[in-house]
Structure formats: structure tokens, C-alpha cells
């Protein structure tokens, strides 16, 4: 992997390419989620008006939660990028042949193992940033399964 060859020494090398990719995707996904939510709220609030797109962009941009975007971007860069890189390297080590059975097993393991881990870590990351670690058990109890099943 080219990102792992950035230093000449042996040992752990931060997977920079994967971290940048994951943080970019996290930022993009969070931005789309926020814009979609703002758009729906704005559309509902002016549903009687004939022009729903008039002056919507300034309010959408001013209402953007930049700290939330930073939380998600940092999660992608520091945790998801490196973590998923290690996970997929491990899967490739354990199941090196690209047979249909191995591919199906990797997909199944992603859903059974990686999915719950990602949800658990992203909830913890957000609650840590928000100073609400004490609320984490309730968050898991209330939202973990719906998030796992519906995203």
C-alpha cells in the first residue's frame, strides 16, 4: 500500500490515504444530511408559499452545524479511516482468496462485527465531544439497533 510506504522504517505507519478518504466522505455525508434536514424543515415551514427555493441557501449555510461537521470529519480521519484499514487488512489476511464464499463471509462479518463496532465508536465519539459520556448507555439502548438496521 502506497500510504503505508511513506516512511522508510518498519512498524506502524498511519494510513494517511485511508484517513483522508474517510474524513472526506464523513464530511460529505454529514453535509448532505444537514442540508437535507435544513431543506425539509425550510420547505415545511414555507409550504404555503409558491416559491420554496427563494433565499433558502443563505439560511441553510448559516444554520450549518460546523462543530458537528468537525466531529464527523475528525472521526473519519482519526478512527474510521485507520480502523477500517486495519479491519480490511485483517480480513484479507484471514480470507486471502477471493472466492464467492470468502467474499460473502467478508460481507457478513462486516455487518455482524464492523457495523456494531462503528456505531458504538461513533456514538461514543459524539458523546465525548458533547460532554455527555454519562448519557452513552441510554444512547446505545435507545438508538443502536435502529441505527444498525436503518442507518
Image (cartoon, helix red, strand yellow):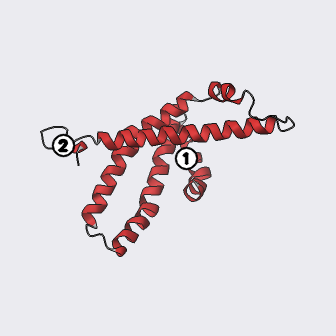
Q: Residue 86, how many percent across, how many down?
A: 30, 51
- State whether residue 86 appears in this view: yes
Marks 1 and 2 sit apart, C-alpha to C-alpha, by 40 Å
Quarter-wise, where is residue 135 in the image?
top right
Determine the secondary structure under disc 1.
helix
Q: Residue at 42% of width from left, 39% of height from top?
A: 23
51 and 149: which is toward the camera: 51
Q: Residues within 10 Å of mark 2 (few under 14, many from 20)?
A: few
Q: Earlier in the sequence, mark 1 or mark 2?
A: 2
Q: Residues within 10 Å of mark 1 (few under 14, many from 20)?
A: few
Q: Is residue 151 above or below residue 128?
A: below
Disc number at residue 137? 1
**Mark 1 touches mark 2? (CB < 8 Å):** no
Q: Residue at 45% of width from left, 50% of height from top?
A: 118
Q: Residue 107, how many percent across, how many down?
A: 42, 65
Disc number at residue 17? none
Q: Is residue 55 above or below residue 89?
A: above
Apparent side of residue 55 relative to residue 49 in the rendered image (left or right): left
- State whether residue 131 appears in this view: no
Q: Residue at 37% of width from left, 69% of height from top?
A: 103
Q: Residue 18, how many percent across, how many down?
A: 34, 44
Q: Is residue 105 above or below residue 55?
A: below
Q: How many numbered markers are drawn?
A: 2
Apparent side of residue 137 relative to residue 21 in the rendered image (left or right): right
18 and 105: which is toward the camera: 18
Q: Which residue is mark 2?
A: 5
Q: Residue 53, how many percent across, how many down?
A: 74, 34
Determine the secondary structure under disc 2.
helix
Q: Is residue 105 above or below residue 125?
A: below
Amino acid at each position: 500500500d502506497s500510504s503505508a510506504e511513506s516512511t522508510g522504517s518498519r512498524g506502524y505507519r498511519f494510513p494517511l490515504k485511508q484517513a483522508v478518504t474517510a474524513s472526506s466522505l464523513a464530511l460529505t455525508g454529514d453535509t448532505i444530511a444537514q442540508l437535507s434536514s435544513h431543506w425539509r424543515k425550510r420547505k415545511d415551514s414555507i409550504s404555503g408559499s409558491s416559491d420554496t427555493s427563494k433565499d433558502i441557501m443563505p439560511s441553510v449555510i448559516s444554520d450549518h452545524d460546523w462543530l458537528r461537521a468537525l466531529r464527523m470529519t475528525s472521526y473519519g480521519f482519526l478512527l474510521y479511516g485507520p480502523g477500517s484499514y486495519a479491519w480490511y487488512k485483517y480480513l484479507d489476511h484471514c480470507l486471502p482468496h477471493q472466492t464467492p464464499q470468502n467474499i460473502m463471509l467478508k460481507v457478513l462479518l462486516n455487518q455482524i462485527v464492523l457495523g456494531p463496532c462503528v456505531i458504538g465508536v461513533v456514538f461514543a465519539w459524539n458523546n465525548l465531544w458533547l460532554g455527555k459520556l454519562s448519557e452513552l448507555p441510554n444512547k446505545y439502548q435507545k438508538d443502536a439497533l435502529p441505527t444498525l438496521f436503518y442507518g
